[in-house]
Amino acid sequence: GNSVTQMEGPVTLSEEAFLTINCTYTATGYPSLFWYVQYPGEGLQLLLKATKADDKGSNKGFEATYRKETTSFHLEKGSVQVSDSAVYFCALRGSSGNTPLVFGKGTRLSVIA
Amino acid sequence: GAVVSQHPSRVICKSGTSVKIECRSLDFQATTMFWYRQFPKQSLMLMATSNEGSKATYEQGVEKDKFLINHASLTLSTLTVTSAHPEDSSFYICSASGGQQETQYFGPGTRLLVL
């Protein structure tokens, strides 16, 4: 079945550092790929998404490119801020129908000033 | 973006009691709602998929008689944990979607602690 593997945290970075959180997936067909963010005490929010190969999703300085050849969707940001501290989840959704999301385990990011 | 609410946000109950969790889509009609469970430092695990007016579809290993799901309207789904036990303590999260391949919007979650 479909699955998502993302790097385990926690990740601790200094402000303005470069961020990469790796995510790879296993799926049949052509899934859609997502990054969700969960800030402390809040629900999951969609950060960005890509629906087909070579698409790049971007939002709030974060970006991720759908790489079918490497089955990856790594999250990157050039300069993190303290306010980016949160848990980040990579997820995929199968290509047929209104299917549920399959999540990775989440990566906790802490950014220190 | 769309808003999904959950109530209560936190509940503590005694073992053997039943707990109902509500999930509401506040500004759109949710034809499909999903219920997830999240253990500490773990990912979200899908429990069931619920379409308005239909019986919920449960994932393998999830007891449908223990986790009763009702999706009676396009804006409300409920999850009832019947005869709760300490091992049911977890973070329960719902999400709502307006239709085929629509974005899923997540509720803030309900933390259940069974003593």
Image (cartoon, coloured by chain):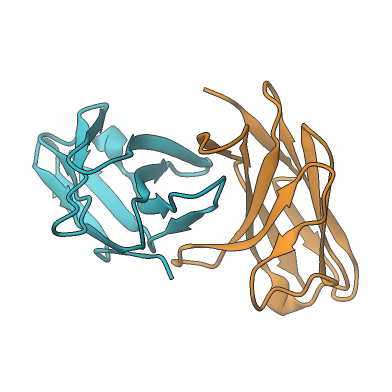
The image quarter containing residue A22 is: bottom left
- Left/right placement of residue A96 relative to residue A70 reads right
Q: Is residue A105 above or below residue B50?
A: below
- Left/right placement of residue B65 relative to residue A37 reads right
The image quarter containing residue B69 is: bottom right
Return the x and y of residue B1 as percentages of the image width and height. Answer: 52, 22
Q: Is residue B10 above or below residue B101?
A: below
Residue displayed at 17% across by 40% down: A54
Determine the colour of chain B.
Answer: orange
The image quarter containing residue A57 is: top left
Return the x and y of residue B41 as percentages of the image width and height. Answer: 44, 66
Determine the colour of chain A.
Answer: cyan
Return the x and y of residue B25 as percentages of the image width and height. Answer: 70, 31
Quarter of the picture holding the N terminus of chain A: bottom left
Return the x and y of residue B7 as percentages of the image width and height. Answer: 76, 42
Quarter of the picture holding the C terminus of chain A: top left
Residue displayed at 73% across by 51% down: B50
Count of picture labels: 0
Q: Is residue B57 above or below residue A77?
A: below
- Left/right placement of residue A63 relative to residue B95 reads left
- Left/right placement of residue B97 relative to residue B22 reads left
Residue displayed at 35% across by 62% down: A27
Residue displayed at 68% across by 42% down: B32
